[in-house]
């Protein structure tokens, strides 16, 4: 029997599944104390909170603790990710939270049903981030607050820099729908209907030999993964040879004396007054 050719949608679904599995462990290490520190002071006990695009739910657990005895609801598009989030919450004995499979652009909640909302590393992956923010604004009560955090590839620096590393950075940015969205978070919140917004930023840096070596190897093995190579080649963005050059450049960078990298995570608060 002849096997039918794989469709673009099937390739995208397979790649998305691989991407979730690749980053799932790192995402599960996120915490509210570290990744939502700018947002936690605005939470009070008894609030009802939405974690939109919760991933494996490790941040949701901390947010739920901050609003207890209120409720935290985590939503994500992936059924598998929601299953992982439920398992993590159960393993940690977390209470006051639940998880649902849902689309952030079509939330299954009535208007004005939450006091607070949070989104971490979500908007960079959405084709229409403004639509998502407007939908979250819809389900917030008057006086509600949102906290948003996302990357911005304009805020990344690296040394020593090489043409192959610059090419790798361009490729990683191209894989995201909105690689430069961080600087626009405050403006997007205002456009989505939030009466007030405040922009913030947090810098992270890697500059010790142990960390840069680990980071270089992580990105080298990431770029060498057959799933990523197939995804990039299918789109004609880069060749297999170019990707091998990028991976080698990351390993060389990680082993370089004095290697350094730093990046901004942009953050914003918005009030639904």
Image (cartoon, rainbow, N blue to C red):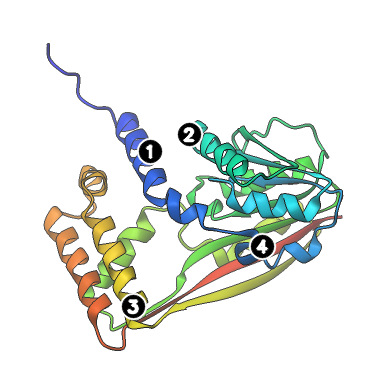
Q: Quadrant of the N terminus?
A: top left
Q: Earlier in the sequence, mark 4 or mark 1?
A: 1
- According to the picture, the residue beneath numbered tag 3 turns out to be 210
Q: Which mark is residue 80?
A: 2
Residue drawn at the location 24% of the way across and 52% of the way down: 237
> Helix or strand or loop: what does disc 3 sit on?
helix
Residue drawn at the location 51% of the way across and 39% of the way down: 84
The front one of 195 and 142 is 142
Q: Badge 1: how crowded within 10 Å, few (<14), some, or many (20+)?
A: some
Contact? badges 3 and 1 (CB < 8 Å) = no
> Number of marks in the image?
4
Q: Nearer the viewer, mark 3 or mark 2?
A: 3
- According to the picture, the residue beneath numbered tag 1 turns out to be 17
Quarter-wise, where is residue 183 in the image? bottom right
Q: Badge 4: how crowded within 10 Å, few (<14), some, or many (20+)?
A: some
Q: Badge 2: how crowded within 10 Å, few (<14), some, or many (20+)?
A: some
Image x and y of residue 55, in percent: 54, 45
């Amino acid at each position: 029997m002849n096997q039918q050719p794989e469709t673009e949608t099937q390739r995208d679904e397979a790649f998305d599944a691989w991407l979730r599995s690749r980053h799932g462990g790192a995402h599960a290490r996120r915490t509210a104390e570290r990744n939502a520190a700018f947002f936690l002071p605005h939470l009070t006990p008894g609030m009802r909170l939405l974690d939109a695009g919760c991933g494996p739910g490790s941040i949701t657990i901390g947010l739920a603790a901050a609003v207890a005895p209120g409720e935290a609801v985590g939503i994500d598009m992936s059924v598998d990710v929601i299953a992982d989030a439920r398992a993590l919450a159960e393993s940690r004995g977390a209470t006051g939270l639940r998880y649902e499979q849902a689309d952030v652009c079509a939330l299954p909640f009535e208007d004005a049903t939450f006091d607070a909302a949070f989104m971490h590393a979500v908007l960079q992956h959405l084709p229409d981030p403004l639509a998502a923010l407007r939908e979250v604004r819809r389900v917030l009560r008057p006086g509600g607050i949102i906290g948003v955090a996302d990357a911005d590839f304009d805020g990344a620096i690296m040394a020593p820099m090489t043409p192959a590393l610059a090419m790798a950075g361009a490729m990683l940015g191209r894989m995201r729908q909105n690689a430069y969205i961080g600087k626009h978070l405050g403006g997007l919140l205002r456009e989505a209907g939030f009466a007030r917004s405040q922009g913030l930023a947090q810098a992270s840096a890697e500059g010790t030999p142990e960390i840069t070596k680990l980071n270089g190897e992580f990105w080298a093995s990431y770029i060498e993964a057959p799933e990523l190579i197939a995804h990039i080649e299918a789109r004609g963005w880069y060749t297999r040879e170019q990707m091998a050059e990028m991976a080698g450049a990351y390993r060389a960078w990680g082993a370089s004396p004095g290697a350094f990298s730093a990046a901004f995570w942009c953050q914003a608060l918005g009030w639904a007054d």
